[in-house]
Amino acid sequence: MPIWAQPGPGGGYGLDIDTTLPPLNLTPAEATAVATALAAAKAMPLAEAGQSALRKILAVMAAAPRDTASNLVSHIRIVQEAGTLTNPLYDTIQQAFVECIAAQITYQDAQDRVTVRVIEPAGIFRTPNGWFLAAWCRLRRAPRAFRLDRISQATLTGESFTPRSLDTLLADLPYELAQPLLT
């Protein structure tokens, strides 16, 4: 830590102000937008992590903006989609993303055929038909999209892989998608 010191009477020590981070300053409208987006996405992967992040944001906001944001939020209602994606399988898929480890999945397609595949996950995306996992499928040797609610099992293989670009995989799939969340 960069510490400054001044010897003698009236001296002391402290942290260099130039190396500290400023406080998180969200406007009430920004905090409300984050809370609304997270509430609208309760049926998404990582929903619990989003709620945890929201609690942290609210904990560090000053009282007046937090109270104004709470007032704004009290005027918003969201009808939730049927079903949620809180499933331990998604922790395995998240770990596969983060650690670049191939995963073996058991998947039931739209015609109720069940296959076991080894995949290299690249990302997730949402369409009007649900949440999908975009991955390189080693069985088909091509990009594939797997509807998350049709994956019944997922285990890590221990085999590492070189990550592929989500945008590159999506370009070969029949989905028209929005831009990345953070640009």
Image (tube, rainbow, N blue to C red):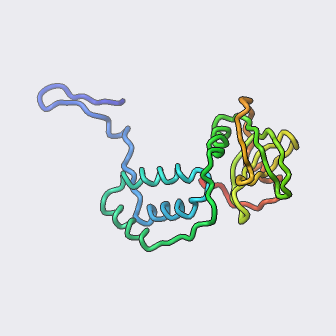
Which quadrant of the figure has residue 58? Answer: bottom left
Which quadrant of the figure has residue 181? Answer: bottom right
Residue drawn where x is 65% and y is 55% of the image: 180
- Of the 4 image quadrants, the one containing the N terminus is top left
**Can you give x and y, in whole percent of width and height, for residue 62 in the image?**
32, 57
Residue drawn where x is 42% and y is 70% of the image: 74
Q: Is residue 160 left or right of residue 29?
A: right
Q: Does 111 sit above or below residue 122? A: below
The number of discs equals: 0
Nearer the observer, 54 or 65: 54
Q: Is residue 12 left or right of residue 68?
A: left
Q: Residue furthest left?
A: 9
**Can you give x and y, in whole percent of width and height, for residue 70 in the image?**
38, 66
Residue drawn where x is 50% and y is 65% of the image: 36
Nearer the observer, 101 or 22: 101
Residue drawn where x is 65% and y is 34% of the image: 99
Which quadrant of the figure has residue 3? Answer: top left
Q: Is residue 117 left or right of residue 98?
A: right
**Can you give x and y, in whole percent of width and height, for residue 159 in the image?**
74, 29
Nearer the observer, 108 or 182: 108
**Can you give x and y, in whole percent of width and height, for residue 43 in the image?**
60, 59
Q: Does 8 sit above or below residue 66? A: above
Q: Residue furthest bottom?
A: 75
Nearer the observer, 126 or 80: 80
Q: Residue furthest right?
A: 140
